[in-house]
Image (cartoon, rainbow, N blue to C red):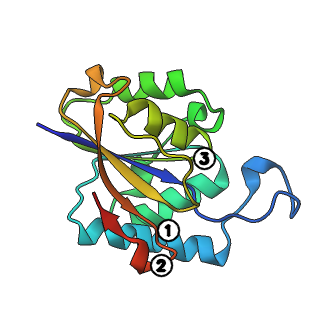
């Protein structure tokens, strides 16, 4: 059975100088709207997300919550993981390897550059230079979560909510 990992870079957030710490940066109105569009995209493409894991930073968790709200995922079941915020790819890989085999589709919401580096590490023969805010890319795995490692994922879909014309499926 195939597994799908949706990687999302958090949606647009307030600038770093606006107030508070980096962790407390909230989504802009555009970021909120883009997050809702991500959820609508997932519904339209018949995703069946069993697990959502997010960085604990407000901008990432807000992105995850808005997506979850659109796909009718129980907000109480969103997991937060410090390793996603702290840019620790090895710990994120360990996290993926611990996902129960009954879980087929996972949404992971994180930050640049970690989310791109994780995609590049897991993807077979594909390198991404960057990801825009609120960009979604998916990887398909034909191995159990326990065996997910470098190059074990094949590219799936990509979606940019900024403009419907940029939605594409590989």
Residue 163 numbered tag:
2
Question: Measured from the top left, where is residue 136 in percent x and y?
Answer: 43, 57
Quarter of the image with the C terminus is: bottom left
Question: Measured from the top left, where is residue 10 in percent x and y?
Answer: 57, 56
Which is nearer the eye, 65 or 8? 8
Quadrant of the rendered structure where residue 114 is? top right
Asked whether, in this view, residue 41 is left or right of residue 35, the answer is: left
- Which residue in the structure is indicated by mark 1? 35
Question: Measured from the top left, where is residue 1 in percent x and y?
Answer: 11, 36
Q: Earlier in the sequence, mark 1 or mark 2?
A: 1
**Which residue is depicted at the point 53% across and 62% down?**
134
Distance from disc 2 to disc 3, alpha carbons, whole Å, reads 21 Å
Quadrant of the rendered structure where residue 84 is? top right
Q: Earlier in the sequence, mark 3 or mark 1?
A: 1
Distance from disc 3 to disc 1, alpha carbons, whole Å, reads 14 Å
Against 136, is 36 above or below?
below
Which secondary structure, mark 2?
loop
Asked whether, in this view, residue 99 is left or right of residue 108, the answer is: left
The reply to whether the C-beta atoms of the residues labelled 3 and 1 are less than 8 Å apart is no
Which of labels 1 and 2 is toward the front? Answer: 2
**Which residue is depicted at the point 32% across and 30% down?**
99
- Which residue in the structure is indicated by mark 3? 111
The reply to whether the C-beta atoms of the residues labelled 2 and 3 are less than 8 Å apart is no
Against 107, is 169 above or below?
below
């Amino acid at each position: 059975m195939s597994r799908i990992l949706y990687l999302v870079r958090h949606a647009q957030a307030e600038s770093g100088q606006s107030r508070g710490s980096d962790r407390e940066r909230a989504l802009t109105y555009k970021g909120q709207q883009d997050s809702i569009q991500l959820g609508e995209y997932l519904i339209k493409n018949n995703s069946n997300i069993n697990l959502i894991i997010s960085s604990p930073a407000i901008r990432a968790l807000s992105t995850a919550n808005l997506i979850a709200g659109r796909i009718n995922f129980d907000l109480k079941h969103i997991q937060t993981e410090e390793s996603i915020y702290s840019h620790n790819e090895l710990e994120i890989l360990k996290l993926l390897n611990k996902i129960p085999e009954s879980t087929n589709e996972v949404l992971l919401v994180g930050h640049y550059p970690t989310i791109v580096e994780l995609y590049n590490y897991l993807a077979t023969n594909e390198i991404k230079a960057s990801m825009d805010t609120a960009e979604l890319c998916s990887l398909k795995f034909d191995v159990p979560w326990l065996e997910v490692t470098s190059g074990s994922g094949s590219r799936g879909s990509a979606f940019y909510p900024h403009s419907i014309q940029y939605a594409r499926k590989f």
